[in-house]
Image (cartoon, grey):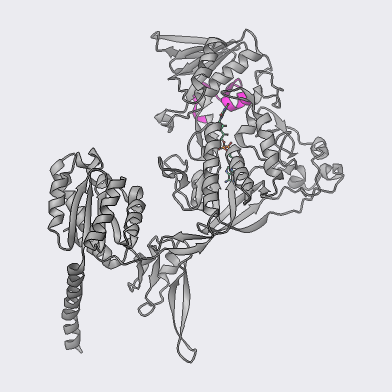
Amino acid sequence: MWIVAARCQVLIPVIIAASYKNIVTMAKIGVFICHCGENIAGKVDTSRLVAALEDHPGVAVSVEYKYFCSDPGQESVKRAIRENNLTGVVVAACSPRMHEATFRKACAEAGLNPYLCEIANIREHCSWVHTDSDMATEKAIDITRSIVEKVKLNNTLHPIEVPVTRRALVIGGGIAGIQAALDIANAGQEVVLVEREPSLGGHMAQLSETFPTLDCSQCIMTPRMVEAAQHPNIRLLTYSEVESVDGYIGNFKVRIRMKSRFVDTQACTGCGDCYTKCPVKKIPSEFDCGLGKRTAIFTPFAQSVPNNPVIDKANCIYFKNGKCKLCVKACKFDAIDFTFEDQYLDLEIGAIVVATGFQVQDTAMYGEYGYGKYADVITGLQFERLASASGPTAGKIRRPSDQKEPQHIVFIQCAGSRDPSKGVRYCSKICCMYTAKHAMLYTHKVHGGKTSIFYMDIRAAGKGYDEFTRRAIEEDEASYLRGRVSKVWEENGKLMVRGVDTLLGRPVEIAADMVVLATAMVPQPGAKEFAKTIGIGYDEYGFYNEAHLKLRPVESSTAGIFLAGACQSPKDIPDSVSQASASASKVLALFSKDKLEREPVIASCNEATCAGCWGCVLACPYNAIEKKDILDRSGRLVKQVASVNPGLCQGCGTCVTFCRSNSIDLAGFTEKQIFAEVMGLS
Ligand SMILES: Cc1cc2nc3c(=O)[nH]c(=O)nc-3n(C[C@H](O)[C@H](O)[C@H](O)COP(=O)(O)OP(=O)(O)OC[C@H]3O[C@@H](n4cnc5c(N)ncnc54)[C@H](O)[C@@H]3O)c2cc1C
């Protein structure tokens, strides 16, 4: 037995080496080295690369070209495949994220299975990150050779076909979510629109008038909200949240929690008798940013959609001590029931649009500006509520401290944005515009009122935006001071603002009646956790990542999940609406097919060697691996093995690393291929 074993140890490598040699001799690989203009050729000596690959075993063609992704470039790849009967293609170029699909398509058109084509990334992984030309060239040779070794072992693969559920989920009922839902629904497809607050509307419902046209926000928003709520193809779930998302493009399984309002929305007519009778009247209204008050049973604002109230359990007397029920007595329709509980809804969904928006930055970190200490230091969003006809002062600009009309307001731009010390390095994009708008609204309402605006730069890129800020200066006499504010304090009933005017090169001190902070636009609270729940990527701040910033700006990193609005980055209304319509068009394109083709990069298990340890079952993040019974001829259970569901597998490869018996492999990335790639580096 020992002799046999010893022989096997010698023989097996010999057999493997022999068959590998066979593959090597049979291989006819074409290597196409792209200059990518100066991007690669500016650093890597491409002629040396061509020569090095020419001599590499199994390489039949080694050529270079300025742009292989161009039409003539692709044509030359196709021609080389046909003329040389190539068995594999390696394109040494940019990242596979950029052009893998392009070249695989070209190969398929030339009759070569697309999965026999691979990209050697000599741009992002080489020319872009190295300064020494010689060493970069050596590295490019290594990278390309290693991919050639992998391609020699590539197998033909075929896309997997999966059915598509033609129902879209839109998460977030601000302007972006509403627009996406309406576009999809108007094209005849079913939409489930989920909003976590009691009403649709998001931030736009809170705004007074909107730049650059100064049209009333509610007037343009409310009809959209009503249209979405009444649309026959839209199922509106407000006061609801997505609990989990499983599955994959075309076939997501989504669980939604519908939080209890304690109000039967079918019976409720929205008459408002309940909240007029509610004895708890002094709760700061979230919608009015704390400047107005609400009751314990409430609708967020007069035009709420749906117009059904919700009971705030934490502040309701009945929930606190079991007494009261004045709202129940007031309701003529028996719509209020304190025993109602949250409900769960499980839905099959084909595509998801995430439109969860933003929040304004927590002002607690701006101690130097006195927010929270002085009642008349407010945020831009609070100013919107003061200026809004439906706001707590019915549109009159009044100081929160004494309800007097302020005669001089200081606006501080970039309160948070572009400030690394406060953790926000980016520009919030909308603050220059809304501050100019606030200055205009104020002078339209308070004739003779004075405005001083501290700014770093005026960023007004957008249709009609520069004209708008100029109008604030020229027609409404807004006084712009280029510089930062160091301190705000109270003195003799005034807010003293100390800053510097860097254009005049001198310190300034202004006695103001009110200070308005243009706080940064930051991700929603819990944005990162929510991204993990639905399985999409996010940046260092928590804004959701697009698949490619330039070429796939509305797709998330997960197939079938799209992005719309300010959840991706700070955006104004026109940009949010455009992106929402773009996402909707992606969803509709997906729904235009009966079946979807998925990458065949999925795991499979060798049942003969599987030891049934279930490490893979525990490791799989997509629940794609099940236990399968292996029966003998008489139907007796012989053993249980791991079995991969190809519909659920996302090809992440986690199971492969967990498999102790080396029984699981990933198509397109088999252990042999990976080893060959690594060995190709030496
Ligand atoms: C002070 C101020 C003034 C502005 N003025 C203007 C202006 O004049 N003109 C202009 O063009 N733009 C203006 N803007 C920008 C404008 O508000 C935004 O462009 C717009 O609101 C973005 O819309 P959205 O739908 O992406 O996000 P949002 O309006 O934030 O809506 C997101 C929605 O998603 C919901 N949501 C969040 N998380 C979840 C979840 N997990 N599940 C379900 N629902 C969720 C939220 O409750 C919300 O309803 C202003 C912004 C501010 C702060």
49 displayed left or right of 535: left
Q: Which of the pair 169/265 is nearer the observer?
A: 169
Q: Quadrant of ligand 1?
A: top right
List x then y, in percent, for residue 385.
Answer: 65, 26
58 displayed left or right of 95: left
For the point 59% across and 27% down, the residue is 381
Membership of 227 in magenta stretch: no
Q: Which residues are magenta?
A: 364-384
Q: Quadrant of the C terminus?
A: bottom left
List x then y, in percent, for residue 595.
Answer: 51, 61
Q: Which of the pair 271/53 is nearer the observer?
A: 53
For the point 61% across and 47% down, the residue is 187
Residue 268 occupies quadrant: top right
For the point 20% across and 74% down, the residue is 19
Q: Which of the pair 491/393 is nearer the observer?
A: 393
List x then y, in percent, for residue 541.
Answer: 44, 39
Q: Is residue 331 visible?
A: yes
- Pick out the residue farthest to the bottom: 634
Q: Quadrant of the N terminus?
A: bottom left
Q: Is residue 368 visible?
A: no
For the point 71% across and 31% down, the residue is 293
List x then y, in percent, for residue 148.
Answer: 22, 59
Above or below: residue 283 compared with residue 97: above
575 displayed left or right of 423: right
